[in-house]
Image (tube, helix red, strand yellow):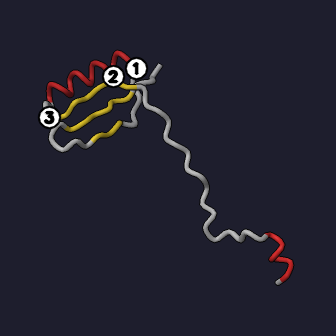
Amino acid sequence: MKTHAIHWRSTVSGSTGTGTKLFEKEEAEHLAAELNEKYPDIDHEAVIPSPAPIEPASTEGVDSDPGRANNL
């Protein structure tokens, strides 16, 4: 089952990121090792990505007084 992504961190700038493509665990580990050899200034590791936080819906522009429409 494809559950792992590649997480990376630059040892130069400190920037980090996690890829969006999923791999099987063994494939992700192999790819991370290969990327670490090819790009020594970036640490790569196979991780199970955490779900993105859900942001609350925007209430901008919403009238907080639903009875007001009846008074117009």
Disc 3, SS: loop
Q: Quadrant of residue 13?
A: top left
Which residue does the image show at 29% across and 40% down from the upper left? 16
- Return the x and y of residue 10 as percentages of the image width and height: 20, 38
Say whether marks 3 and 1 touch (CB < 8 Å).
no
In this view, the residue farthest toward the bottom is 72
- Which residue type carries mark 2? Ala
Nearer-the-camera pick, 47 or 26: 47
Nearer-the-camera pick, 24 or 43: 43
* Mark number displayed over residue 24: 1
Disc 1, SS: loop
* Mark number displayed over residue 28: 2
Q: Neighbour class for label 2 at 10 Å: few (<14), some, many (≥20)? A: many
- Which residue type carries mark 1? Glu
- List the residue tagged with mark 3: 41
Mark 3 vs mark 2: which is more N-terminal? Answer: 2
Q: Quadrant of residue 36?
A: top left
Q: Quadrant of residue 4?
A: top left
In this view, the residue farthest toward the top is 26
Say whether marks 2 and 1 touch (CB < 8 Å).
yes
